[in-house]
Amino acid sequence: MKASRARAVGVLAVACAAGAAWVIPYAWMVLTSFKTLAEIVDDPVAPLPRHLDGGAYREVFATMPVGRYAAVTVCMALAIASAQIALALPAGYALAKLRFVGKRFAFGVVLACLLVPAQATFVPVFLLFAKIRLVNTMAALVLPFAASALGTFLVRQALVSVPDEIVEAARMDGASEWAIVYRVLAPMLRPTLVSLFLVSFVFHYNDYFWPLVMTTDDSVRTLPLGVALLREQGTGIRWHIVMAGNVVLSVPLLALFAIAQKHLLRAARGS
Amino acid sequence: MHPRHPWHPWAMLCPTLALLGVFLVCPIAIAAYGSLFSWDLLTPPRFVGVANYGAIAFHGDLLSIALRTVAYSAMVVFGTMSLGLALALLLNRPGRFYAFVRASVFSAYVVSWVAVALLWMWLFDGNSGIVGRGLRLLGAGPISLLGDVHSALPALAIVGVWKLTGYAMIVFLAGLQSVPISLLEAAALDGARAWARFRHVTMPLLAPTAAFVATTSLITSFQAFDVVRIMTQGGPARSTELFVYAIYEQIFLDLRVGRASALTVVFFLLLLALTGLQLRVWRARSEPLR
C-alpha cells in the first residue's frame, strides 16, 4: 500500500515536471510581453513584470498592420481549407465508388502526390508565378494548396466504408451526382471533414515557408511573416515586443485548440 | 458502381488532378530540367548539362548539407520518439490534471513554428535568456547556444523536439489504447513485473505505432526550414544550414536557379528514399503481428 502511494506521488511529480517543460515557456512568453525594455535590461530573469505594461502590444500594433495581416492570413487559410474539402469530396467519391478506366492511374497520382512536399516544389512554382506575375497575390498563396492529396485520400478511405445502397437510393430519387456528393455523402462524413478542415486551417494559418517565398512585399503578407519580421526590425532585439507579437499570433490558435481539441486530436491520431 | 456517364468520374477528378499536376508533379519535372541550366533570373539560361550537380557536390557542400540534415533529423526523431513514448506511458491516466498536461504538451504542435522559434530564441538568449542563465547557474560560462558552432544544431533539435513531442505522444496514446488490458492482466497473473510487461507485451504491440511516428517525424524534420531561417539563418559558420534552407539560399540570396533546382532534385530523391525505407521497415515490423 505504502509503496503504491509513493509510486503515485512519484508519477505525479514527474507529470508536473513534464507539464512545466511546456507551460513555463508559454508563461515566459506572456510575462515577457508585459514587461518594459528597462525591466528586461535591468533583470532579465525576474519572473513577474513590475506592473502589467501594454507598451509592447501598442508597439506591435503601431509597427505592423495587425488587422490586415490577420485578415489576409485567415482568408487564405479559410480559402485553402474550404477548397480542399470542396474538391476532395467529388474526387474521393469517384475514386471510392465509381468504376472507370484509368482509376488505378488516377489513384496512383494522388498517392504519389502524398510524397511531394511544398519544399520540393517551391523553386519551379515561384519561377512560374514570377513569369505570369502572380507573386505577391492571394492566388499564389491559395492555388498551390487548393487540392490536397492527403484530403482526397482520406475522403476516399472514408467513402469506401459507406454502403453503395445509399448512393443507389439517392440515384433512384433522382439526385444528380453532385447532389449525391455534397448533400448526401458530405453530411455522413462530417467528423472526417471537420478534422480535415481544422487541420488544414491550422497548418496554413501557421505556415511561414510558403508565404515567405511567394511574397516580396507587404501586399499579401501574413501574420507569421509579420511577427517574424518584428525580430528583424529596429536596433537590437527588443524581446518584449517580439513576445507580444508571438502572443498575438498564438492566442487565437490556442483558443481554437481549446475549443476544437477533440477534432484536432482525432486528426493527429489519424482516425 | 457504374458512373451514370462515362465522363462523370473525370469531371469529378479533373480539378484535383489538374491542380496536383500543375503544382506537384510538373514542378518536380521542371526542377529536373532546370537543373541542367545555369541561370540567374536576369540573363537567359545557358545549358550546362550536369555541371550544377558537380558544382553542388564539389563546391556546394552537398555532402555536409545532407549529413547535417540527417543529423538534425536523427536527433529530432530520437528525441520525439523517446519523450513521446515516455510521456504517453506517464500521462495515460484518468483525471483532469493529466488531461491538462497532455493538452499542454500537444499544444506546441498546434502553435506556429514562427512563435515556437522566436520563443526559444528568447529562452536561449546568451545574456538574458532563462536557459542561458540556468546553464550559468550550473557553472557554465556565459554561452550562447545558438552562437556556437557545436551547440547550434542540437539547440535547433531541442526546439524541434519540443514542438513535435506532443504529436508523437498522442499517436502513442492511441496505440496504448489498442493494447488489450486482458493481455497485460494475464502477464501480471503470470508474475511479470511492470518492466517485463512493458518490454514483452506493450512494446511489441506498439511497434507499428512507433514505425509510424518515426516515419512522420523523420519526414517532417527532414523538411525543417522555419527554425533555421528564424533562429540562425544557417549560421554560425554554416553549422545549421539544412537542406531546404540551402535551396532557399541558392535561389533567393545567390540567384542560382540551376543549382537550386539541382539541390531540389537531390532533396526530393533523398526524401523518396527515406519514405521507401520507412515503409519497408513499417511493413516488416507490422506483419508478424497480423
Image (tube, coloured by chain):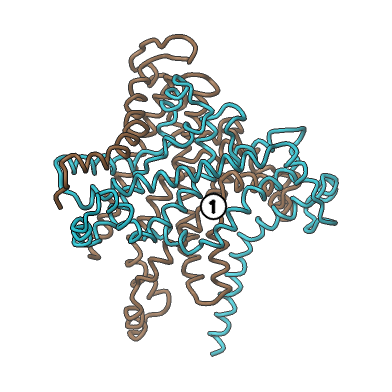
Image coordinates of residue A66 in percent, x first then y, are 67, 41
Residue sitting nearer the eye, B150 or A181: A181
**Nearest to the observer: residue B262 or residue A50:** A50
Q: Which chain is brown?
A: B
Please give left or right for residue A145 compared with residue A29 in the image: left
Q: Residue drawn 29% across and 42% down?
A: A110
Mark 1, Cα crowd under 10 Å, few <14 / some 14-19 / many 20+, is many
Residue A79 left/right relative to A67: left
Residue A28 x/y as whole percent? 70, 55
Where is residue B4 drawn, in percent x and y? 16, 47
Q: Chain of mark 1?
A: B
Q: Which chain is cyan?
A: A
Q: In the image as oriented, which residue stretches furthest toward the front? A: A174
Task: Give the answer, above or below, for where A168 lies relative to B277.
Answer: below
Residue highlighted by disc 1: B163
Pick the residue in front: B20 or A91: A91
Q: Residue at the spot x=45%, y=61% of the render?
A: A263
